[in-house]
Amino acid sequence: MSMIILASGSPRRKEILETAGLSFEIIPAKGEEQILHTEPDLVVQDLSAQKALEVAGNIYHYSQKQLENLFCEEEGSEEKKLVTDTMVIGADTVVACDGKILGKPKDEKDAFEMLKNLSGRAHKVYTGVTIVLMEPSGRSGKITFSEETQVHVAPLTDQEIRDYIATGEPMDKAGAYGIQGAFGMFISRIEGDYQNVVGFPLARFYSELKKIGIDIRKW
């Protein structure tokens, strides 16, 4: 029986996958994240891979290094067809402004400074996704990619920023805002995938699996 595992406790990613009609289990990764790059797109790819490999390794009792050694050759090839019964999905999202990654705010003052910086200008949101595919034979394949969306924020007054912070919504979110919440009224436009900003680029996920002969709708 095919099984999908989401290596994330994000309620937003859970909602996106459920809305797509997918059945899956949630096993959040718990390991300490190691940031090896400074470029936002590479950071999210690395972090998504760490999460997916950790959970896949725990399921199959492999170390991350052992999993890497098991990966099928010609990874990512459009000609490659994987016969898989387990899919582990890791994802990570960051907000970047002027090339600097904005994490979750430490406190309300930090949230205010972040939102003040985003006010009246454009920034980018990156989500990295890693899909580990385990074959019945014990071999595996891995797909890693990142998606970028540009978000334009309307000019905000200090009072608007303070009122938004008072809702508590920004405190657990990268960049100190959630586009799907109250902050949505301050977004003037986006260029790219809206769901990518929420936390999971569903269309790209479908496309990447389709390239290797997997129709996620039939899982």
Image (cartoon, rainbow, N blue to C red):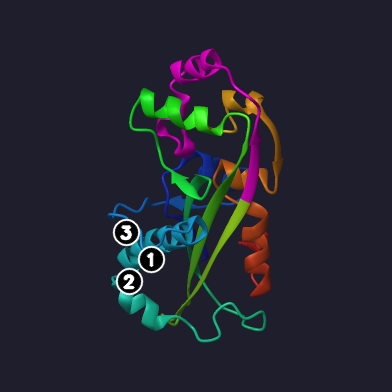
Depth check, front residue: 175 or 48: 175
Q: Which residue is drawn at 37% across and 83% down?
A: 69
Q: Where is residue 80 in the image (x, y as percent from the top left)?
A: 62, 83
Instruction: Give the foreground label among 2 and 3.
Output: 3
Q: Residue furthest bottom?
A: 73
In space, the residues marked 2 and 3 are separated at their CA atoms by 13 Å
Pick the front one: 26 or 193: 193
Query: Which stretch did the figure color magenta?
Result: 149-176
Q: In this view, does 189 lie above or below 154?
A: below
Residue 53: mark: 1
Q: Which residue is drawn at 32% across and 78% down?
A: 66
* Residue that appears at 63% across and 52% down: 202
Q: Mark 3 points at which residue?
A: 34
Instruction: Report helix, strand or loop for mark 1.
Output: helix
Q: Identify the residue position indicated by label 2 in the image.
A: 64
Task: Classify 10 Å Cα crowding around label 3: few (below 14), some (14-19), many (20 and above).
Answer: few
Label 3 and label 1: CA atoms lie apart by 13 Å
* Residue mark closest to the camera, 3 vs 1: 3
Discs 1, 2 touching: Cβ within 8 Å:
yes
The location of residue 128, given as percent across then percent down, is: 51, 57
The reply, left or right, for residue 31 in relation to residue 88 is: left
